[in-house]
Image: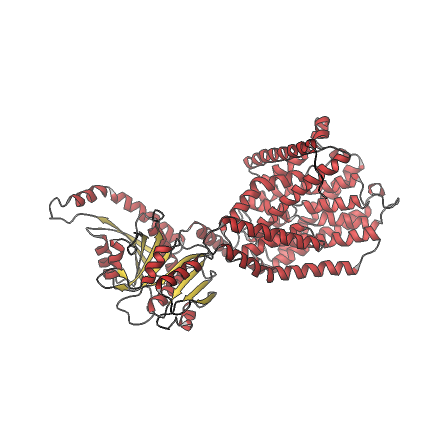
Amino acid sequence: MLTSLSHHELLVFWTELLALFAVAWALGAFARRLGLPSVVGELSAGLILGPSILGVVAPGLFDWFLPSGEEAVTQSAMLLAVSWFSAAFLLVVAGFETDLALISRLGRAAALVTTGSVIVPLIGGLVAGWLMPVVFYGAVDGGRPDRIVFALFIAASVAVSALAVIAKILSDLNLMRRDVGQITIAAGMANDLVGWVILGVIAGLAASGHVSAIDVVATVGGLAIFMVGAFTIGQRLVDAALRLVRREGHNVRGALTVILATMLTFGVLTQALGVEAVLGTFVAGVVLARSRYQQVEAEHTIEDLTSVIFAPLFFATAGLRLDLSLLRGSALGWALLLLLVALGLKFAGSFLGAKLGGLTTQEGFVLGSGLNARGALEIIIATVGLSLGVFNQTTFTMIVMIPLVTSLLASIGLRVFSRGLEGSVAERERLAREQALESNLLIRNNRILLPSASEANSIVAAQIVHFAWPPDLAATVLAVRSNGAGPNIDVMGNVLYGREFEVAELDPGIDDATAAMEIIAQSRLGYGVIALGAGIESGHGQFGSSLVDEVLNRTDLPVVIVRKAMNHPGRLPGVFAQALVPIAGSHSSQAALELAANLSSNLGTHLLLSHVVYRPRSGTGPGSLFDRFRASAFAGSDDVAGGLLAEALRYAMETRATADTEVRFAGSPAVEIVKRANAIEADLVVIGAQVRRVPGRRPSLGPNVEHVLEHCPQTVVVVVMPDQRSS
């Protein structure tokens, strides 16, 4: 039955939230100004507002802010509920950034680091706990707890790491996508799993005096079943839900609903298994990020909310229960010893695992620092130990102090040891590729949609995108049947060899308008580009298929249109040795350059980056009013051309393309492009276009592009960027 809160209790609660958020935000910003992760300041906020500082400086205010007695039960429960909810969001975001494929490639190093980071401090904690005086023991049924139970609680407290804290520090330092960052996340996840299992075992031992093998097997087996189910049945259900909300295009609200529902469902399942819900929310984040139908905008919304609200509240709340006034005399000495065991042996075990796994010394230092971050799990272990009578209040304070201090030092250590970390050649190439994909207009980290009939233009289109897009991006071949014939899947499979792809078929007999609507509906399910083959109607400069017209009129995605070489009888060109790429200052021109440069880096195609400057034809007098306007508009364009070509060449070099640049002067850019392509014996022309949609008429790509499509004998690739001004 729900119990109403008094006006005073609600006032205190809202004041607690305001104070925790404000102080955590201010100290986080101050930490960033000092070059430290914001989590350093956020963790310090709880220490300042807790009994250690506020309780000493202003005891009256502290008693009102964190009341004791019966009222404390309600206030603590509300604060801890907020803390757990905030931790759930932290772990979801950590799951978004966790790359299981990358971790599997780093499997040996990750396994050795995990083993070393758990076993070494666990042994040290057992020894320290065994040697600690009985004055630090709690009371169980009027007597002292067993020494082995006490030692096990101490060992668990110093051995495990905190995934939420690790993820936040790595994110603050932009290390999440680094190899060491992914290994740290993998080891941190394993630390959490081991920690929950150990806690279940020793809590049962403390409560009953013996270990129940059945309970241990049930917990471990339940976790194994949950993990398998999450990445099989759970993945399919999440995919289906995200696909459903994307059927009408971008739907951030729908995606957020699926994210929250998945997070809560997985949290409930792990909590029911006897493992804390935050582990389930982490797995939820991984499953959501793996879905091909996930919307990046929804992930970014969750990440922003977590960074601004939930992370400061979680870390600030962690320090509220720390009372440093209890650490006097021998208690201070033992507290420092436990801190040394926790720091030193966790670092040593992680470093040893890193070296055995073939990592560098610097990477070992980074891992040793990162895995020293601790948080909620350690506080939970201490809380359980206190509630079961294994710990007294002084020992509880010792243990709670460890995550605060180690997380602060882990933040500083990661900052220091990661400075100048280069990583392997493969890692640097991966990071550069990921950064390029984030900043690109066209070639991004999304699936490729290939509507295809049996005609040769579609096959050449598949070849173009296959060599221009990263090989780990999957494609969907959407079979469009024409006169009962669909695409030759064997040929498409040969063209897309090595790339994951699936085949989907449209219903035979549908008209072009209906087929276009089906293509658009499919494209809304997480695709980044539509690649179409198209012939051109001679003498009109228009596409030979109304299907292409319909797609251009309806889609908001970039479209790559490929018209195969006019003078090549076969389905595939022999080679793309030379490509002409007209350069302008538009987004569509930049997108065309991206395609051409990536094609060059993969095939060795030489690019000629050409900028055509308009010049009125000589000997024709002053010309028309339009000619005079164009001449004045393009006055001084030589400098503009130099800047555009320099920027284009820089991008080409960054993508390891082979390219030269030139400036051409002509009265008709379209005629000059065709003429120049013939002069250099190009195999390919890649040009950008912006579609203009006029109600009741066919879509237009502009007279220049349409002239090139109709008159250029080479293979022509047109990269069409939607006109945002169009209706």
Q: Relative to the observer, which residue lies in front, 591 or 530? A: 530
Does residue 396 appear left or right of residue 315 in this picture?
Answer: right
Give x and y (percent) for residue 34.
56, 35
Q: Quadrant of the N terminus?
A: top right
**Residue 204 visible in the snapshot:** yes
Position of 531 compared to 624: left or right?
right
| Colour scheme of the rendered structure | secondary structure
Q: Residue at x 42, y 59 (%)?
A: 469
Q: Going by the picture, which residue comes out furthest to the front?
A: 1
Extreme residue toward the right, this view: 142
Residue 641, percent from left and from top: 28, 46
Q: How many marks?
A: 0
Residue at x 66%, y 39% (from the top left corner): 317
Could you tell whether 285 is left or right of 250 in the image? right
Residue 187 in view here = no
- Which residue appears at 25% of the width and 44% of the height? 637
Which x, y percent locates residue 73?
74, 38
In which quadrant of the rendered view does residue 11 lie?
A: top right
Say left or right for 346 vs 181.
right
Between 162 and 708, the residue placed more toward the observer is: 708
Place of residue 465 in the rendered image (x, y in percent of width and height, measured from the top left): 39, 61
Judge by depth and name the residue closer to the eye, 213 or 480: 480
**Residue 75 versus residue 209 in the image, above or below:** above
